[in-house]
Image (cartoon, grey):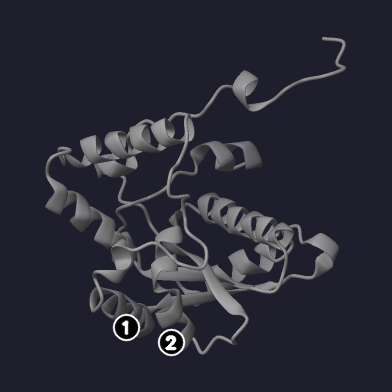
Amino acid sequence: MNVSDAVRGRRSIRDFLPDPIPESVLREIFGAARWAPSGSNVQAWKIIAVAGAERDAVVRMAQSKPEAGLASSDDFPIYPPNLWEPLCSRRFALAEDMYRALGIPREDKPARLKQVARNFEFFGAPVGLFFVIDRRVAHGQWAHLGMLIQTVALLIEERGLGCCMQEAWAAFRPELAKRFALGPDEMVYCGMAVGYPDRSKAVNQFERNRISVDELAEFRGFDQ
């Protein structure tokens, strides 16, 4: 698999097989991902990987506070309160496509909330990752953390695994910080579910859209 294949093939997996992922596989992925770009090589990040009993304990922690999972993070919200166009329509369209694949109508709010709550079960994945950053760094370093996350995701794809990046875990930042004994300046930015995708599930098959190259980019000064 080349890089282009990994980029195009990667998608958010929301239903996983229970097959375990050995620690050695994650060590291999992280060994390559640690070479992701980092401004001035400060590497103000770390990854916490949970599996087995530790993964289950994190899930139970989240399930014990179901109302927290529906709240926005106070220190850094996932989305601004009034998302503008065309961003709002893009987000809405993706949600509708996903729930249609799941067979959940718009008016079935309990079923939709139940699906949201599956974030905090890692969608059945055997491994959960948490990406941690030092709060004191500027937002430029947050962008570099995103490069690390994307690099991890592409390496996961290369190995025939799948993942789902989960900013939803931001709702549990205080609880996760306590569980992982993070320092006062360390913050869980997001989680990631990792495992073997269940390719039979429609939620892992629906078509996704992206804006065109002409919408994405401007080309200036080129001859043709």
- The image position of residue 164, as x and y in percent, is 43, 54
Quadrant that contains the C terminus: top right
- Disc 2 versus disc 1: nearer the observer: 2
Q: Residue at x 31, y 57 (%)?
A: 16
For label 2, the crowd category at 10 Å Cα-Cα, with few meaning under 14, some 14 to 19 and many 20 or more, is few
Within the image, what quadrant is residue 218 found in? Answer: top right
Which amino acid type is shown beneath numbered disc 2? Arg
Pick the front one: 24 or 32: 32
Q: Residue at x 50, y 29 (%)?
A: 210
Task: Residue under label 2, please give it.
Answer: 179
- The image position of residue 53, as x and y in percent, is 33, 84
Q: Secondary structure at mark 2?
A: helix
Q: Is residue 187 in view from this perspective?
A: yes
Which of the numbered marks, if any, corresponds to residue 150?
none
Q: Is residue 208 in view from this perspective?
A: no
Above/below status of 30 relative to 216? below
Which amino acid type is shown beneath numbered disc 1? Ala
Q: CA distance from mark 2 to mark 1?
A: 10 Å
- Residue most toward the top? 224
Task: Residue under label 1, please give it.
Answer: 57
Q: Is residue 201 left or right of residue 19?
A: left
Pick the front one: 66 or 31: 66
Q: Residue at x 47, y 31 (%)?
A: 85
- Residue most toward the front? 82
Q: Are marks 2 and 1 in contact (CB under 8 Å)?
A: yes
Q: Is residue 73 left or right of residue 221?
A: left
- The image position of residue 130, as x and y in percent, is 50, 70
